[in-house]
Image (tube, grey):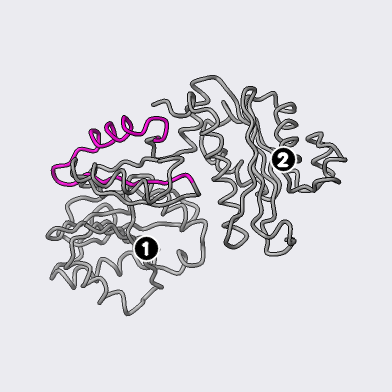
Amino acid sequence: MKNRLIFIGNIFIQNQAFRDYIIRTIETDGMALDSIEYYREADRNFFGDLEKRLKDEEMLYILTSKKSFTLVGKLLCTLLGDKLVLKKQMLIPSQCETCVENSYRLDINTSAINVIQAQESQEIPELLITLPSAQQKLHFFETPIKEVIEALKPLSRQFDVSLAFSQIVEGWVEVSVTCNTFGSIDKFIQIAQERHPAKIIVTEDLVQHIIDATLATQQKITLAESCTGGLLAYYFTSHAGVSSVFEGSLVTYSNILKENWLAVDHATLVKHGAVSEEVVAEMCEGALNVAKADYALAISGVAGPDGGSPEKPVGTVVIGVKSKNYENVVRCHFKGDRNYIQQQSALTALKMLILGDKKVFFKKF
């Protein structure tokens, strides 16, 4: 069964922050979206497309602006031979039995449709679709994606689950696990973890898992960022309650701040340059000393599109992780545009943190 999201209204096309909030809310609620579609107000193609959708087995969210909300109801009535009635101060199809303020659900054959009126700067109304099948997400580390697929595919058939694979960065594969009719996700995950100890973490949100792990051990994290400009800090601070484990981030974009805030030696910068293992190691040390934290992550690189050289082309990023008992600094070569290079850098730093202290981060919570 396909899970689809349809936006109807110019506000969803224009306002990216609002649109991203809605997508994030739906996916956090457990709906893994197969597609997202956009229509402007009064788009004539929508009626024909909706008619096709009603013939398929689909879970369908239709997010509308205030202007389009009643119009969508009229179109549904036309397709179903129904009429609009007033319920909870909304004009909605009479066949609808489940509704709350600004949100109603229609069950048509084997499909479910949730029509929601969303307004900018307001909380999204209640979602009325629940998933028919259980889902889990696991993160497989230190193994190429081809080997992860070869390791888990036979096990998925044994326990009747479906798998979808994505390589987040090198050495980190995210696996979405969906339970089929007679499947068992719990048994699949149990056997997978037994066969691959210290390689699998089961969580919907890896950053939240890191927060929970450091909180359980009463440890703290600090950051020193250059080319990522605070992106790694955002990954942490987007989670409520992170202040218990996160000491903060120093965005030392210039060499002057690397020296003054992190005590990176001037001679090290002159000799090796800001994008070097030597400088990143000193950034980690300086961040630990400033914050008195247990873990420090540091990133310095060339995100592009300019600034590269033959020795350090665009995409060259040095990432370090340091604790009281562990230190690792690696040079990476990422490809893509500026934003994707920054994201790969921050995600690789998370991976390095986890692998640097397996006793802490591979525990179950």
- Span shown in magenta: 171-200
Q: Could you tell me which secondary element the residue under label 1 belongs to? A: strand
194 in the magenta segment: yes
Residue 19 is left or right of residue 51, and the answer is right
Q: Answer with mark 2 or mark 1, whichever residue precedes in sequence.
A: 1
Residue 324 is left or right of residue 212, and the answer is right
151 in the magenta segment: no
Q: Where residue 102 sits in the image (x, y, percent)?
A: 33, 54
Q: Where residue 99 sits in the image (x, y, percent)?
A: 24, 51
Q: Where residue 350 sits in the image (x, y, percent)?
A: 54, 39
Which residue is farthest bottom?
44
Residue 82 is left or right of residue 125, and the answer is left
Answer few, some or many: residues within 10 Å of disc 1's Cα (few below 14, many 20 plus, some between 14 and 19).
few
| Residue at the spot of label 1 | 36
Q: Quadrant of residue 200?
A: top left
Pick whichever, 350 or 320, lies toward us.
320
Q: What's the mark number on residue 345?
A: none
Pick whichever, 67 or 299, lies toward us.
299
Q: Where residue 343 sits in the image (x, y, percent)?
A: 57, 51
For the point 30% across and 70% down, which residue is it? 71
Q: Could you tell me which secondary element the residue under label 2 belongs to? A: helix
For the point 51% across and 31% down, which residue is it? 211
C-alpha separation, residue under disc 2 versus residue under disc 1: 40 Å
Q: What's the mark number on residue 280?
A: 2
For the point 33% across and 47% down, which residue is it? 176
Three-letter amino acid code of the residue under disc 2: Val
Determine whether 226 is above or below 241 in the image: below
Three-letter amino acid code of the residue under disc 1: Ile
Answer few, some or many: residues within 10 Å of disc 2's Cα (few below 14, many 20 plus, some between 14 and 19).
many
For the point 14% across and 59% down, which residue is it? 95
